[in-house]
Amino acid sequence: MEQKLRQVLDKRIKSAQQLKQFRQTLIDGKGEKRITVSVCGGTACLALGAREIVAAFTEEIEKHELQVKVEFKETGCQGFCARGPAVLVGPQKIFYQKVKPEDVPEIINETVLKGNIIKRLLYTDPATNQEITYESDVPFYKKQTRLIMGTNSEIDPTNIEQYIALGGYSALSKALFQLNPEKIVDEITRSGLRGRGGGGFPTGRKWQSCRAAEGDIKYVICNGDEGDPGSYQDGSILGGNPHSVIEGMIIGAFAIGSHEGYIYVRNEYPLAVKHARIAIEQAMDYGLLGDNILGSGFNFKVTINKGGGAFVCGESSALIASLEGKVGEPKAKYVHMAEKGLWDRPSLLNNVKTWANVPQIINKGSAWFS
Amino acid sequence: MDTSLDFSTVQAIIANKAVKVEALIDSYADKKEQLIALLQDVQVEFNYIPQDVIIKISQKLDIPLSQIFSVATFFKAFSLKPRGRHTITVCLGTACHVKGGQRLVDKLARDYHLMPGETTEDEKFTLEAVNCLGCCAMGPVVVVDDKYEGQVTPDKLDKILKKYE
């Protein structure tokens, strides 16, 4: 117990400088691992047998003693579910689709060890009948600029270090030490970011009124109760890159002066619930959540609430009723949530994807986003 | 399968459950706003929400019975009737519906006498119809317990269900 406690204490990052150093050690620590193999572990790929493929890779990598050379990971949803299970071999990102466990030894022998491409596993463009080797050339990906989901294939969602290595939590450190709450709200307002849950309400205006609202206790809420058929952005973000959402929430909390946050996720997304829960624990261990975040003196904690399977709870007043342990029925909103929300206190409620946008806007500036 | 248990074992199981319920409710003593989470835990423990547990929660946490009842009946995740050992979830979201999800529900009604929300007489299966599980590309989707099955046809469904006892 004592040892565990010490380990946890040791992990805590106590300043912006330490975070920077830690990131550098993570990048340097990769050393010889020049080849990456990432198996998509999103809901669809898992259902199509990704777990067996992960097991096969782990076995093959051990057999060939490639642990030092190959960085292997199971990631969140990579996007192209119709062609799952998907395997990406980096750094060039060779895209293999509909992979079966039997294909794994060949991928290791041919592609990883010799650099040969296995034609049989490539994606064929139905329009031109051409085989496509790299992920970036697949028409489905080619026309997208994937700001939020793009890094999913590089991150193991259950490992905070991989998020930090890719620049994660740098926006938080910028917000805490280089900006002040007014500036953050200003930046979000000027970026023109709007509610990504579909409502499209200007996010900056919401933040502004919540910041201005009177009350010493305020709440930050993340709405992950999406229920629109065929849209699973919230599930994929929370399952694939939960730290981007948490980082956004901490920045939002700092901007409006809140110390408590809730993530409300659908019960039907067990993967999102699990990964978000692990992410919160790890962020606590690393001193990125909890008391005195990064040594700034700012405190913030996040709790996960699972939905009860009611479609209407994606609506903000119903969601808040459900958080309060009541029947999730919508109410007439004569007063904005920003002024009177959870427990009748000012509450800042945004969609998962809206939160995930925040770190990038803070890092790259409002002009870049707008 | 030997299902006979002697009386003292049964008593021990019941007593054990009662202790667990007490402990569970006590762990929510200072956070009664998390009623939904508590009910979710009860649901996981018993596979349904027994009447005596509702009464106990009401007494221990000082929440009106009517409020617990309204929450327990409002959310789809809760059931007031015992549920089967396995839960079959059939997706009827738009994409799965188009690809034939309804045929699976029809088949279960016809061959297994199982309607959405209900449990088979032998308490083996409970059927849930849901809207979108977030993997439309492989529709129609059926989940049995935690295992996802894609592109399910009525014939394939038979084969899948045979695996469960």
Image (cartoon, rainbow, N blue to C red):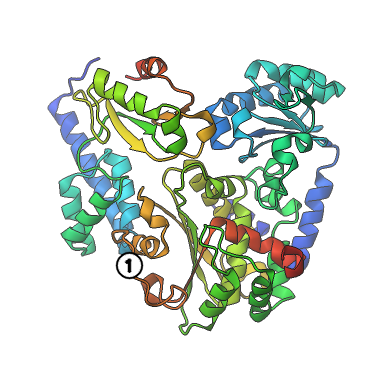
Quick check: B14 left or right of A237? left
Label 1 environment density (alpha carbons within 10 Å; few <14, some 14–19, many ≥20)? few
Tell me residue A5's x, y (percent).
58, 56
**Circle 1 residue:** A331
Residue at the (65%, 39%) spot, across then down = A78
Q: Is residue A275 above or below residue A300?
A: above
Tell me residue A331's x, y (percent).
32, 67
SS state under label 1: loop
Q: Is residue A84 visible?
A: no
**To which quarter of the image does residue A67 belong?**
top right
Quick check: A232 left or right of B23? right
In the displayed image of the protein, which residue is found farthest to the left? Answer: B7
Callout count? 1
Residue at the (30%, 63%) spot, across then down = B32
Subunit under mark 1? A
Tell me residue B101's x, y (percent).
39, 29
In the displayed image of the protein, which residue is found farthest to the front? Answer: A127
Name the kind of residue labelled 1 in the image.
Lys
Tell me residue A93's x, y (percent).
78, 35
Q: Nearer the viewer, residue B79 or A29?
A: B79
Quick check: A157 left or right of B99? right
